Image (tube, rainbow, N blue to C red):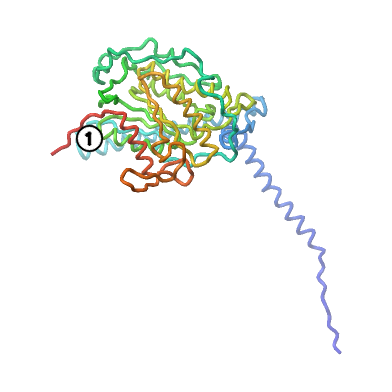
C-alpha cells in the first residue's frame, strides 16, 4: 500500500503578518485623531451651537479651556470666513461689471437704465425639515402669560390725526425720530448683541404708521417695503406673499431662516437681526411667523429653565415684546402669526403656550395677531392633515412631518397675510 505524504504548513509567519498589519494602521488612526482634533479646535463654537440646537444640552467645547491657544481656533475660523466672504463679494462684483460692459457693447446706453428693484430674498431655499421633539414636553404649563408679563410696557399707539395719511405723504414728512431706540431693551441672555447699524448706513425712520382703509387693511404703496421673518414655516409662505406684493409694485425682504426661533438667541438672534435690518432698510410692515423650534427648555449659563415655567414665559415674552416695541418706535406695523396645530402632541401643547404669549404682546391697533389654527383645521383645537373647503372638496394642507405645509396650505396662510393689505391698483396693458 502506497504511503501518502501529508504536508503540514507552519503557522509561524501568521503573528508576524498580523503585527505588520497593526503597525500599518497606526498612521491612519493618527490622521483621523488629528483631523478630529483640528475640527474641534477650529469649529468649537459651531459644534457647541449645533449640539445645543439638536440635543438641547451643553457640549461645552468652547468653555473647555480658557487658554489663549485653545480659543484662538475660533478666531482663525472667523478670519478665514471673512476673507472668503470678501473674495466672493469681489468675484461677484467683477462678474456684474463684466456683464454690464457686455450689455453696453451689445445694447448700447440703454443697458445702463436701472430696472425696478427686485424682490429681495435672503433665504431662497424652501425649508429643510425642522428639528423636532423626541421627548415629551413637561405638563407644567399652567402659568398664564398675564402672570408673568411685566406691567406698564404699553407700546405707542398710532395717533388718530395721522390715520388718513398715505404712504407717499408719510415719506415726504419723514423725520428722524428722537425716541426711535427707546423701546428696545437688550436681551439679558444674549451675551454679544450686535450694533444696530452704523451712522453711515442708517436710514431715516418713518414718522407715521402706514394708514388703514375703511376695512382696517394696511394701505401700501410702491414706496413701502414689507419685512418677512420667521422659521421654515415662513420659508414656505414668504415666496407667495412676496410674489403678490411684487405684482402690486410693493417691495419685500424675506429673511426667513430654518431651525430658528426666540428660545436660543445664541444660535440665531432674531430681535437683533430685525433691529439691524430695520436700521438699514425703510420698512413699513413687519410680518413674523415662527414658534415650531421654540417649545424647548431655555439655557441660562449652565442651568436649564423648563419650558412653560414662569421664568421661561417671562423671558420669551420679553423677546417678543422687544421686537414689537422697536418696530413701533420706528412707526412700523407688526403682523404676528400664531403657530398652527401641530401633528406631534408634545409640540402642539407647546405652541398653545407660545400663541398666548404672541397674542398678549399685541396691545394696540398699530399691530395685529393672526390665529392660523382655524384655517388649517376644521376644528380649531385639533390637528388635521387635510381640511374640507366650503365647496365640499378635501384639500391636503400639511406635510407628513406634521409641521410644514403643502402648497395648498402655504397659499391659505399667504392669503391670510395678504388680506391685511390694501395694495396699489396696477393697470394692465391693453
Residue furthest top in the image: 178
- Eyeballing the image, is 146 above or below 140? above
- Eyeballing the image, is 367 above or below 397? above
Residue furthest left in the image: 430
**Mark 1 Cα-neighbour bin, 10 Å: few <14, some 14–19, many ≥20:** some
On the question of residue 275 being in view, the answer is no
Quadrant location, the C terminus: top left
Residue furthest bottom in the image: 1
Q: Nearer the viewer, residue 318 or 247?
A: 318
Q: Nearer the viewer, residue 408 or 185?
A: 408
Quadrant location, the N terminus: bottom right
Residue 141 sits in quarter: top right
User: Which residue is drawn at the image coordinates 28% and 14% (left, top)?
Assistant: 162
Q: Position of residue 397 (x, y in %)?
A: 40, 44
- In the rendered view, does 30 fall on the left or right side of 78? right
Q: Position of residue 205 (x, y in %)?
A: 34, 17
- In the rendered view, does 212 fall on the left or right side of 279? left
Q: Nearer the viewer, residue 267 or 61?
A: 267
Q: Position of residue 107 (x, y in %)?
A: 20, 38
- In the rendered view, does 405 fall on the left or right side of 210? right
Q: How many marks?
A: 1
Q: Which residue is mark 1?
A: 111
User: Which residue is drawn at the image coordinates 46% and 14% (left, top)?
Assistant: 153
- In the rendered view, does 78 fall on the left or right side of 248? right
Q: Nearer the viewer, residue 293 or 35?
A: 293
Residue 420 sits in quarter: top left
> What SS does tag 1 mark?
helix
Residue 62 sits in quarter: top right
Q: Position of residue 326 (x, y in %)?
A: 42, 18
On the question of residue 252 being in view, the answer is yes
Amino acid at each position: 500500500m502506497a504511503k501518502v505524504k501529508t504536508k503540514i504548513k507552519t503557522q509561524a509567519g501568521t503573528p508576524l503578518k498580523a503585527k505588520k498589519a497593526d503597525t500599518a494602521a497606526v498612521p491612519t488612526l493618527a490622521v483621523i485623531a488629528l483631523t478630529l482634533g483640528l475640527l474641534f479646535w477650529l469649529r468649537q463654537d459651531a459644534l457647541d451651537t449645533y449640539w445645543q440646537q439638536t440635543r438641547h444640552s451643553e457640549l461645552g467645547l468652547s468653555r473647555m479651556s480658557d487658554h489663549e491657544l485653545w480659543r484662538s481656533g475660533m478666531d482663525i475660523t472667523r478670519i478665514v470666513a471673512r476673507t472668503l466672504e470678501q473674495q466672493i463679494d469681489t468675484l461677484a462684483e467683477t462678474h456684474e461689471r463684466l456683464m454690464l460692459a457686455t450689455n453696453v457693447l451689445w445694447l448700447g446706453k440703454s443697458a445702463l437704465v436701472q430696472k425696478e428693484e427686485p424682490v429681495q430674498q435672503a433665504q431662497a431655499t424652501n425649508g429643510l425639515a425642522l428639528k423636532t421633539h423626541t421627548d415629551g414636553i413637561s405638563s407644567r404649563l399652567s402659568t398664564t402669560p398675564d402672570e408673568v408679563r411685566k406691567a406698564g410696557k404699553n407700546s405707542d399707539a398710532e395717533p388718530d390725526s395721522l390715520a388718513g395719511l398715505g404712504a407717499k405723504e408719510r415719506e415726504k414728512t419723514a423725520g428722524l425720530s428722537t425716541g426711535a431706540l427707546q423701546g428696545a431693551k437688550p436681551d439679558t441672555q444674549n451675551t454679544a448683541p450686535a450694533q444696530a447699524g452704523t451712522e453711515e448706513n442708517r436710514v431715516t425712520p418713518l414718522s407715521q404708521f402706514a394708514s388703514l382703509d375703511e376695512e382696517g387693511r394696511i394701505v401700501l404703496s410702491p414706496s413701502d417695503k414689507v419685512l418677512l421673518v420667521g422659521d421654515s414655516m415662513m420659508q414656505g409662505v414668504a415666496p407667495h406673499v412676496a410674489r403678490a406684493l411684487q405684482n402690486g409694485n410693493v417691495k419685500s425682504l424675506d429673511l426667513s431662516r430654518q431651525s430658528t426661533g426666540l428660545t436660543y438667541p445664541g444660535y440665531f438672534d432674531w430681535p437683533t437681526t430685525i433691529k439691524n435690518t430695520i436700521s438699514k432698510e425703510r420698512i413699513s410692515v413687519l410680518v413674523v411667523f415662527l414658534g415650531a423650534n421654540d417649545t424647548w427648555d431655555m439655557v441660562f449659563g449652565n442651568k436649564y429653565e423648563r419650558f412653560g415655567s414662569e421664568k421661561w414665559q417671562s423671558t420669551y415674552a420679553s423677546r417678543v415684546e422687544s421686537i414689537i416695541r422697536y418696530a413701533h418706535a420706528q412707526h412700523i406695523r407688526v403682523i404676528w402669526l400664531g403657530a398652527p396645530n401641530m401633528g406631534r402632541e408634545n409640540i402642539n401643547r407647546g405652541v398653545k403656550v407660545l400663541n398666548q404669549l404672541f397674542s398678549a404682546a399685541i396691545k394696540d391697533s398699530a399691530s395685529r395677531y393672526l390665529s392660523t389654527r382655524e384655517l388649517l383645521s376644521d376644528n380649531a383645537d385639533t390637528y388635521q392633515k387635510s381640511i374640507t373647503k366650503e365647496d365640499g372638496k378635501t384639500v391636503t394642507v400639511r406635510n407628513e412631518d406634521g409641521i410644514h405645509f403643502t402648497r395648498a396650505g402655504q397659499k391659505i396662510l399667504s392669503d391670510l397675510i395678504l388680506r391685511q393689505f390694501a395694495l396699489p391698483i396696477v393697470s394692465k396693458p391693453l
